[in-house]
Image (cartoon, coloured by chain):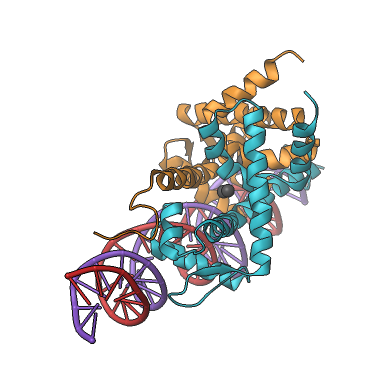
Chain colours: A cyan, B orange, C purple, D red
Amino acid sequence: MTIEPHPAAELPAERTQARRFDKARHAQSAALVEDYAELIADLLASGGEARPTDIARRLGVSHATAIKAIARLKREGLATAKPYRGVFLTAAGERLAERVRLRHRLVVDILLALGVPAEAAEQDAEGIEHHVSDVALAAFERFLDRPR
Amino acid sequence: MTIEPHPAAELPAERTQARRFDKARHAQSAALVEDYAELIADLLASGGEARPTDIARRLGVSHATAIKAIARLKREGLATAKPYRGVFLTAAGERLAERVRLRHRLVVDILLALGVPAEAAEQDAEGIEHHVSDVALAAFERFLDRPR
DNA sequence: CGCAGAGTGTAGCCAAGGCTACATCATAGG
DNA sequence: CCTATGATGTAGCCTTGGCTACACTCTGCG
Ligand SMILES: [Mn+2]
Ligand SMILES: [Mn+2]
Ligand SMILES: [Mn+2]
Ligand SMILES: [Mn+2]
């Protein structure tokens, strides 16, 4: 019998930690689609049009990169686009965009409530938002609602 | 001269938003290295050894993936490793690990303070931590320190 | 009403970070 | 002291999300 120098064959704590990293990786892969959906909805709401070049400029990427990402949104049933006609969201895309928009605002609000300066809050929120679970969001809402 | 149908050629708000996304992208690319450094330091501190297989299991990736990432840490001057001898951190690697460890704890503590359940806090922190700026961290500390 | 120039799309490159399959090394038990 | 086995390393593949370069389409002015 070996006194294992490393705890055990399958320490459950290890699996828990591995699962955390796995969740973070999945959240990250969803982030791109979420940001595009949010931005497209924003452009459609304000200007009435969401064109690849506008999207690219707002995201700070080349238009080719934006067009490829839009193709991914189409593949995933979140957007539609006919050549040279601009981008639109499907019902599913709009639902996603709305959810993301609310989450984004809530994250910014929480950061502000914690005393983070406005521009830092906006900046950090852009990355943080994709990693905030529903249960955390619910906690954020309770925290902001509570008196005082 | 063209009467631009879209606000202006270089609306500063657009650049601001683009810069936010750019920061988030950079933070993301740093995330992997940060998690490895933190984990290696953790393994070295507890068991005394950080072996590729252990690292892989904790992160939930294949050992081949871990070895490639370790190569990246070596390239960036954060780790050293002689074949079959385990992984160690350079001084720079240790500094990074320490910074990441403190940040991770602070993020978890803030989430807990906001009323996020423990496991959700740990899970979300694993992703959030990489997007929290120094100025936000400072705000978090002030918030936690403040009486009541 | 034509066309210059902006916008759009396509092709092909790269690096990162996953994976599996296979080859090599180290070592602990027999 | 041999060797079976687990750990380590290598090779090669895939997908994603960047990029540039180039080709095509639209359209508002002149
Ligand atoms: Mn975002
Ligand atoms: Mn956002
Ligand atoms: Mn992390
Ligand atoms: Mn961490």
User: Is residue B84 placed above or below B137 in the rendered structure?
Assistant: below
Q: Is residue A73 left or right of residue A131?
A: left
**One can see residue A3 in this view:** no
- Whole-percent x and y of residue B2? 28, 60
Measured along the vertical axis of the image, is residue A8 above or below residue A91?
A: above
**Looking at the image, which is closer to me, C1 or B44?**
C1
| Quadrant location, the N terminus of chain B | bottom left
Quadrant hosting residue A29: bottom right
Q: Which residue is painted at 69% across and 15% down in the image?
A: B146
Vertical comparison of B64 with B49: above or below: below
Q: Nearer the viewer, residue B59 or D4?
A: B59
State the quadrant of the C terminus of chain B.
Answer: top right
On the image, the x and y values in percent for residue A83 come to 45, 77
* Above or below: residue B77 compared with residue B17: above
Is residue B113 visible in this depiction of the protein? yes
Q: Nearer the viewer, residue B36 or B19?
A: B19
Q: Position of residue A68 (x, y in %)?
A: 47, 67
Q: Quadrant of residue A40?
A: bottom right
Residue C28 falls left or right of residue A83: right
Q: Which residue appears at 67% of the width and 41% of the height?
A: A106
Looking at the image, residue B121 sits to the left or right of residue B87; the answer is right
Residue nearer the viewer, A43 or A90: A43
How far across and how far down the image is residue C13, in percent?
33, 66
Residue depicted at 58% across the width and 55% down the height: A38
